[in-house]
Amino acid sequence: MRIPFSLPRLKGYCFPREIVAYTVWVYYRFALSTADVEDLLAERGVTVRRKTVRKWVNRFGCHFADCSKRDRPPAADKWHLDEVVIPINGCKYWLRRALDANEDVLDILVQPQRNATAARRFLKASDAKLESKGIPLMLQL
């Protein structure tokens, strides 16, 4: 786990920023409850209340998410596009997933129609979200 350097100095907090960062990271990384995080920290000798864990998660969770998105390595030049039909309330929907060469999920979209225009729109939206320099060099369907 890496602590984002842009994390504020936490002036006025009783705990060092390493403990706060570890708490927020554990909460999101392993999908634990605040009680589980409290127990995990207690095993390491840190006494923190659930309410404090919840406050830290609410205060710093978005900041960590932004830092992890910013520090994510760029997507590879080769993308895979998966399409699956899923029924929702008796209607057909198309689940599209864009994966890079390392099988990292780049984007997910559910659409009610399947046509070339919808696929192009999905790729352009994925490209815009990733802020990459154009649609990938190779695309496998």
Image: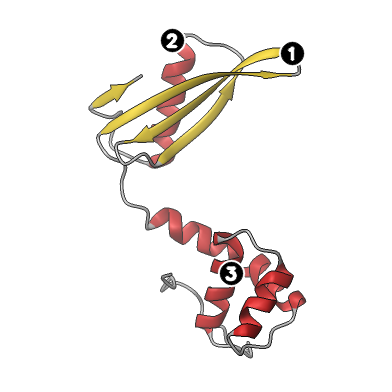
Element class at badge 1: loop
Q: Residue furthest front?
A: 43
Residue 24 got which mark?
3
Q: Quadrant of the C terminus?
A: top left
Residue 90 got which mark?
1
Q: Residue furthest top?
A: 115
Residue 78 got which mark?
none
Q: CA distance from mark 3 to mark 1?
A: 40 Å
* First-in-chain label (2 vs 1): 1
Horizontal arrangement in the rendering, residue 82 relative to residue 19 (left or right):
left
Q: Nearer the viewer, mark 2 or mark 3?
A: 3
Horizontal arrangement in the rendering, residue 51 relative to residue 58 (left or right):
right
Q: CA distance from mark 2 to mark 3?
A: 42 Å
Closer to the camera, 56 or 89?
Answer: 89
Mark 2, residue position:
116
Q: Amino acid at mark 3?
A: Val
Q: Amino acid at mark 2?
A: Ala
Q: Amino acid at mark 1?
A: Gly
Local packing at callout 1 (Cα closer than 10 Å; few below 14, some 14-19, many 20+) is few
